[in-house]
Amino acid sequence: MKNMKRFLMCMILALLTSCSDDDNGDSTEASILGEWKHYSTTLADDNETFFAADGCPSELSITDTDVTIKDYIDVTPPCERYDISFLRYEIAGNVITTTSDGITESFTIVTLNATTLRLRNDDGVVEYRR
């Protein structure tokens, strides 16, 4: 669970940049800034996919320089906030590098459009939706 949370945190930082959507070849820039909700996580080791709960998915809030991650205990309302994480990020091309508590991680932006953000690293792929 701790590794999955860390993976989600890193993926969130990747949301702080913008790039074009690789899925449709559209050259229109999409913004990573704003609010995102966790949709799914696919682990690289066993290709197993976990979907976020409909009621209380993790939330990302991305500004020009920071990412705030809100994780909830319950999978159905009432959602109880139990952890808030703050990360700094930098973007170079389609790679987002995040830093929190001296830990630096990098993610590749696989998809970024108006509704979907998909981030990949060695641990797997995390998808967020607006």
Image (cartoon, rainbow, N blue to C red):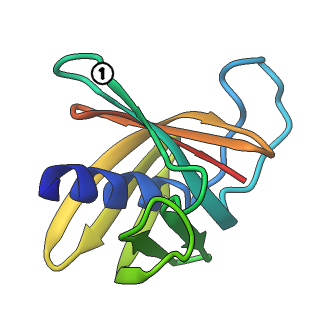
Left or right of 9 in this view: 57: right
- Compared to residue 97, the image places residue 42 above or below, namely above
Identify which residue is drawn at 22% across, 31% down. 122
Q: How many marks?
A: 1
Identify which residue is drawn at 20% across, 62% down. 104
Identify which residue is drawn at 58% across, 71% down. 62
Task: Give x and y (percent) for residue 63.
Answer: 61, 77
From the image, tell me which residue sits under label 1: 48
Left or right of 40 in this view: 84: left
Identify which residue is drawn at 40% across, 51% down. 11
Left or right of 17 in this view: 26: right
Q: Of 21 and 83, which appears nearest the observer? A: 83
Q: Of 64 and 77, which appears nearest the observer? A: 77
Which corner quadrant holds the C terminus?
bottom right
- Compared to residue 14, the image places residue 102 above or below, namely below
The disc labelled 1 sits on which kind of residue?
Glu
Task: Give x and y (percent) for residue 69.
Answer: 44, 72
Q: Of 85 and 56, which appears nearest the observer? A: 56
Task: Give x and y (percent) for residue 9.
Answer: 34, 61
Residue 26's image quarter?
Answer: top right
Task: Give x and y (percent) for residue 120.
Answer: 39, 34
Residue 45's image quarter?
Answer: top left
Helix, strand or loop under label 1: loop
Residue 97's image quarter?
Answer: bottom left
Pointer 1: residues within 10 angstroms few (<14), some, or many (20+)?
few
